[in-house]
Image: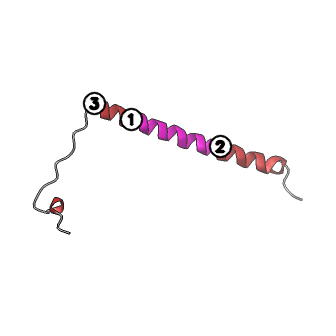
Amino acid sequence: MNDDSADPQQPEVPVQLTEQQLRARRARSIAIALALGAFVVLVFVVTLVRLGARVATPPI
């Protein structure tokens, strides 16, 4: 397995993204953030529903 792409003598050139690619990346990031936020809210609501009235009245 002779891989010439990992040559330590060659400096890496950073990739320049186009404006369209940057907009697409931002849109994906926003969609992931919204999905994560919705998941957190869903877990919180399910937790409250499962605990029910036991949250308001501590055991004696």
- Which secondary structure, mark 2? helix
**Residue 33, percent across and down?**
49, 40
Which image quarter: residue 24? Answer: top left
Q: Outermost residue toward the right?
A: 60
> In this image, 5 relative to 42: left or right?
left
Q: Magenta residues?
A: 27-41
- Above or below: residue 22 compared with residue 47: above
Alpha carbon distance from label 1 to label 3: 11 Å
Q: Which residue is mark 3?
A: 19
**Residue 9, percent across and down?**
10, 61
How crowded pointer 1 is (Cα within 10 Å; few <14, some 14-19, many 20+) is rated as few
Alpha carbon distance from label 2 to label 1: 24 Å
Q: Are marks 1 and 3 in contact (CB under 8 Å)?
A: no
* Residue type pointed to by label 3: Glu
Q: Give me the residue at 17% from left, 67% from top.
A: 2
> In the rendered structure, does residue 12 fall within the stretch colored magenta?
no
> In this image, 32 relative to 44: left or right?
left
Judged by its main secondary structure, the magenta piece is helix
Q: Which residue is mark 1?
A: 26
How crowded pointer 2 is (Cα within 10 Å; few <14, some 14-19, many 20+) is rated as few
Q: Which residue is mark 2?
A: 42
The mark nearer the N terminus, 1 or 3, is 3
- Which secondary structure, mark 3? helix
**Residue 39, percent across and down?**
59, 44
* Residue type pointed to by label 1: Arg
- Which secondary structure, mark 1? helix
Location of the N terminus (image quadrant): bottom left
